Amino acid sequence: MVSLLVHLILGAAVIAWIVRANPKVFSRVPGGPLFSAMEITFYVIGVASIALGYWFNHQFVAQYAVEGGNPIWGEGSWQQFIALGYTNPAAASASQDYTIINVILLPLFTIADGLRRGIKHPWLFFVSSLFTSCAFAYAFYFATVERQHRQENAQALAPSVG
């Protein structure tokens, strides 16, 4: 269970790092609500994915982990968790799809798109997926882009000084 707590702490730390690295994006949007309906939707989906994932991960650890076991290999480990995702063709189909989405597409998309948008450290969205969930990382990135869009619109509508 310690490994789940460590994942939770590291996930929160990476999310905090993203927010602190992008203060302009995450500051309050002038003249607008704290969060848009779209941002709230992305955050609700992302948090739900974390809750579901941690629930299943807790079940995995409770069922497979052994007292004093290694979280990297052996019973109840990360290695066993990955191997169990390939125990039958249906599970393997879903696991390979998830692996490609999370390990290849998520970093390619968030890094390329984030750099174009001026988001600092966009690679951290991939890192967050290692401790939260792939769905959360995408939802958090999409909420960040929505927030950035709202900031840019507010700035464009602001009367210029001088």
Image: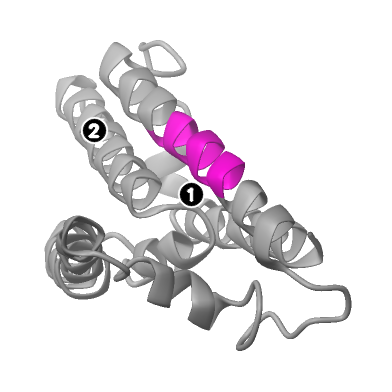
Q: Which amino acid type corresponds to the residue marked 2 in the rendered image?
A: Glu
The residue that mark 2 highlights is 146
Which quarter shows the C terminus?
top left
Foreground: 78 or 132?
Answer: 78
Residue drawn at point x = 59 percent, y = 58 percent = 11
Residue 29 in sight in this render:
no
Tell which of 32 and 136 is nearer to you. Answer: 136
Q: Which residues are magenta?
A: 46-56
Neighbor class of circle 1 (other Cα within 10 Å; few <14, some 14-19, many 20+) is few
Which residue corresponds to the image point at 23% horizontal and 42% vertical from the top-left? 145
Identify the coloring.
Answer: one colour
Residue 159 pos. (x, y %): 21, 20
Q: What is the C-alpha distance between the residues marked 2 and 1? A: 15 Å
Relative placement, left or right, of 42 versus 112 is right
Per the picture, the main secondary structure of the magenta-coloured stretch is helix
Front residue of this view, candidates 4 and 15:
4
Q: In the rendered structure, which amino acid carries the disc numbered 1?
A: Pro
Q: Which residue is mark 1?
A: 23
Specify whether residue 12 is painted magenta. no
**Number of numbered labels in the structure image:** 2
Q: Pick the quarter of the image with the N terminus.
A: bottom right
